[in-house]
Image (cartoon, helix red, strand yellow):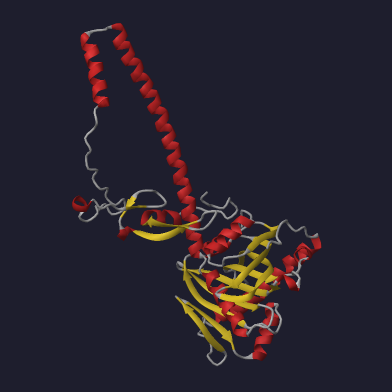
Amino acid sequence: MSVSSSQATLEPGNVEGFRHLAHSIVSRTLALECEYDRMGRPDQDEHVWKLLKRQNRLRVYKRKAQSTDRLDQSRMGGSGNKPTVICVGSVEGSVEDILYGIHAKTRSEMGATMLFMDRNPLDCDVLSVLDSGSKQDPFRQLVIKYLLAETFGDTRVVNDRDVCALESMGFGHDSRGQRYGYYLLRSVDVPECSPLPEDSGVVRASITVCCIYRQVHGCVKVYSKAMIDLGGSLPAFMASDAATEILLSTAEATISATSKRLTSLALQNQRTRKTQESEYLTSSSESDLLLTSSRYTNSYNFRSAKSVSVMESSRTDELRPKTTTKTPSKPCSVCGKKPKMAKLVRSTHRNCGVCNQCVCTKCCVKQKLFARSEPVPIVCCMACLVAAKQLNVDPRDPFPMLP
């Protein structure tokens, strides 16, 4: 089932209204984050918050107190019947990597990114691009997106759910002059993407997710909040579970960013190899032409027995079957070690899926590359992993994807 077949055209007044909505929600969340940061990012009060999940250095809580919950929801721009879930902690990497991992400006990019992050959409689309990045902030983006899915996070529901949401991301500076990154996903009503009829089996969900990220010494401090209403008569814990998984997957978007970088590097290496192969074939053809011309000249001009015998000898050598020699196992391109027992069992190293060089098991890690159908699992050498992290990327560039 697809409802996202064309770009939505919005009136200028509506565009400005969406900009104001995004700015107001991010500003309110930023105020809460600044207060939390001013207090030294303390552990949540167990009398007010219930711990839902731990993942690495991230913790997800659900607010217990209903009265303050309603007040907090109103500040976030949501209604009072959605459970509030908060995610705090830190992740390795950079704020740019988190935003780059989430960033998607077309339907194909959105589908590939969501598939990589295990969200498995039935349908998705970028309905309208309201604002794009600039030199000052290439990660800035304000778009309206559509999503149809049978699961939200790890929560599977009987009827499919769809969402029409405003997505905003980029960088800003707070009142103290400190830089922060932000990501917002907020349900909106757009006439071109109205809810489907009741007999369609699709229920319109409502979602508000707002995240504030700060860079600190090689890691990112995370403060994010979510409120989700899955619609229908589902129990509240299902919405909390869905919010938990969405917040965690958003914070761990650095994994997606690494794969995008590796895919870009693999495509660069592929283009370089093709250029080198083309140059080699061209030079080889010219050499063969010169050699053939030389042989023809020798046999035609001199016709000496010596020249003929040399020609016949070379032809015989070309036709004689060559003896097969064992190809020595190549050493690891990173550490230089050869495979153990290589001479006895002819064991070999694996090839890096990015640079195609031999690499041992100790010098490689499992990664995935972006492709049109589904992510491609590979082994990646540590040299390519380091090179990918140093690669200059711009989210405005074409999405890196294997054919």
Residue found 23% across the figure and 38% down from its top: 324
- Name above or below for residue 10 compared with residue 162: above
Q: In this view, does 360 lie to the left or right of 366?
A: left
Whole-percent x, y for residue 294 in the image = 33, 15
Question: Where the N terminus falls, by quadrant?
Answer: bottom right
Whole-percent x, y for residue 146 in the image = 68, 64
Q: In which quarter of the image is residue 130?
A: bottom right
Q: Is residue 224 visible?
A: no
Q: Is residue 202 left or right of residue 48?
A: right
- Name above or below for residue 95 compared with residue 230: above
Name the residue nearer the viewer: 170 or 362: 362
Q: Can residue 75 be seen in this view?
A: yes
Residue pushed farthest left?
Answer: 344
Residue found 52% across the figure and 83% down from its top: 52
Residue found 24% across the figure and 12% down from its top: 307
Name the residue nearer the viewer: 87 or 293: 293
Please tell me how many numbered marks the rendered image carries. Answer: 0
Whole-percent x, y for residue 374 in the image = 52, 58
- Name above or below for residue 341 compared with residue 289: below
Whole-percent x, y for residue 28 in the image = 66, 76
Q: In this view, does 156 lie to the left or right of 366?
A: right
